[in-house]
Amino acid sequence: MFIGKLNGHFRVLLAGAAVSALVLSAAPSFAETPADTLVQAWAIDDTITLDPAESFELSPAEFLGNAYDMLVRLDVADTSKVKPGVAESWTVSDDGLTYTFKLKPGLKFASGNPITAEDVAWSFERVVKLDKSPAFILTQFGLTKDNVTEKAKATDENTFVLTVDKAYAPSFVLNCLTATVGAVVDKKLLLEHVAAVTPTDDYKFDNDFGNGWMKTGYAGSGPFKIRDWRANEILVLERNDNYYGDKPALARVIYRHVKESATQRLMLESGDVDVARNLEPGDLEAVSKNADLTTTSAPKGTVYYISLNQKNPNLAKPEVRQALKYLVDYDAIGSTLIKGIGEIRQTYQPKGVLGALDSDPFNFDVAKAKELLEKAGLKDGFSITMDVRNTQPVTGIAEAFQQTAGQAGVKVEIIPGDGKQTLTKYRARNHDMYIGQWGMDYWDPNSNAETFTSNPNNADDGTVKTLAWRNAWDVPELTEKTKAALLERDADKRAAMYRELQQAALDTSPFVLIFQQTEVAGLRGNVKNYKLGPNFDSNFVAPVTKE
């Protein structure tokens, strides 16, 4: 555990298996945190589960990216490539259907159990059979509950073979395997923690594949292991001494749940934390002017958007969807709420991704919005609710939108909640409007195209729960075009297909895209080698040191 007063009166730190108390001076202190421990202040209330087969949020992606390894990993030095994870090499058959991975020999999980191809195969099997939110990243290759044991199998102790259903672009398949859902889990350890369940029509298995235990448990092989998690409070990573690669310099990394930017800045200035992760523009500027502190930033494959549930009859009207896009004051948001932490962007593909469309056609135009609302039969406006995670900058953006929408007669009631509350409601399609952020699951244009412009089954019990599905946007034609883009091996033609999909979203979708995130962090001056990656699961802390 870690408990820390803002003025540094005392700290209690988890040190290995023992808890040791460091009693500091009763006077205000600017003492640094221990040299072998990195303490980060970050809003982590979107963490719902630590099971890679189920987790689909942003902050846990970082935890899982540091605590688990995959067959292959994104090469952050060149995001057009992947590099070895537990696999040392791989080949693709001439027909493009069979991927054969050779594992590095002698690898171990944090538990001490050996990593074998059977662990890889079972990891794929449990993802497909559990069929949680991120499962579609693997099932899109034709894997089903009935065929997964044959299509994803170990042929010997160090050889894993994946057979896909179509000749996809190999870069697409490999990019998908870098996602956290592709994490290799410790089969032997998890089999000790499976729970019996009663089979149903939807779930035909008599056990939970360890999913109940894995919500808070750990069965990985990454450079760090997950030591402890308490929701809305703390997560602790501890160095994994069984890791096959370069061992982290730090013994542990502690994430403290701190939502307020000003509080994070004060904690950073006092030395109670080493890193502040949710800095708003004003606090970021203050940190940048402090000689004892530094800052770092990186463009993120994360976009912020307002979504409109098509189950609401008013929001289902095309004119209303477009009207709301004219009721965002993009210029004001860009110059205040996201200054230094984001860039206005109205298309769903982040810059730097193949086929990203650079088009920002909407501006704040109340007259245009009123004209569209009148065409929709809503001349006097309407009332609507918006679910908002109570962190910045989303709260500020929601309040700004509430004010500008009101100028056209759209009365927005903001319903605040923590990350878990708002996401649970959103995932159940029980919202009217929702403001959120979406990070790419893997560095390929399909990641965002599939979630924003694909919805294979719009029924409430649909299993492919993309953002289009969450907002009940039934788009069979765009769904088929999204699928077709996966089979185009010519990069230029594929890029053109993704630009067409983004244009369609601008013209018709229930998504009001606002900005692409620039992730920032404030650092104590003694923190070295701290770099932010393009995705949250590539925010690697293993290279970090403290002087």
Image: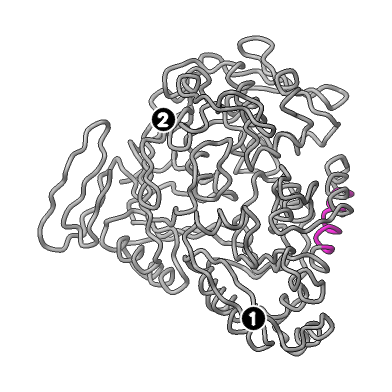
Which residue appears at 45% of the width and 29% of the height? Answer: 246
Q: Nearer the viewer, residue 204 or 341?
A: 204
Closest to the observer, 297 or 47: 47
Q: Is residue 195 above or below residue 535?
A: above
Q: Which stretch is magenta?
A: 493-504
Q: What is the quadrant of the N terminus in the image? A: top left
Q: Amino acid at mark 2?
A: Lys
Earlier residue among tags 1 and 2: 2
Based on the picture, tell me whether residue 498 belongs to the magenta stretch: yes
- Residue 173 is drawn in which quadrant? top right
Q: Position of residue 459 (x, y in %)?
A: 76, 49
In this rendered view, identify the residue nearer to me: 42 or 75.
42
Q: For numbered disc 1, what is the local secondary structure?
A: loop
Which picture quadrant has residue 372?
Answer: bottom right
Expressed as whole percent of the image width and height from the top left, the position of residue 356 reads 76, 57
Tell me if 78 is positioned left or right of 17 in this view.
right
At 11% from the left and 62% from the top, the residue drawn is 27
SS category of the residue bearing label 2: loop
**Residue shown at 78%/55% (left/top)?**
453
Whether residue 324 is situated above or below residue 118 in the rendered picture: below
Q: Which residue is denoted by mark 2 in the rendering? A: 247
How many numbered discs?
A: 2
Residue 300 location (% of width, % of height): 60, 56
Left or right of 113? Residue 292 is left
Q: Position of residue 409 (x, y in %)?
A: 67, 87
Q: Residue at x 37, y 59 (%)?
A: 258
Residue 25, above or below 77: below
Instruction: Report the amino acid beneath label 1.
Output: Asp
Measured in 3D between alpha carbons, the distance from the residue under mark 1 to the one under mark 2, in whole angstroms, is: 48 Å
Identify the residue under disc 1: 329
* Neighbours of disc 2 within 10 Å: few (<14), some (14-19), many (20+): some
Residue 42 is left or right of residue 274, and the answer is: right
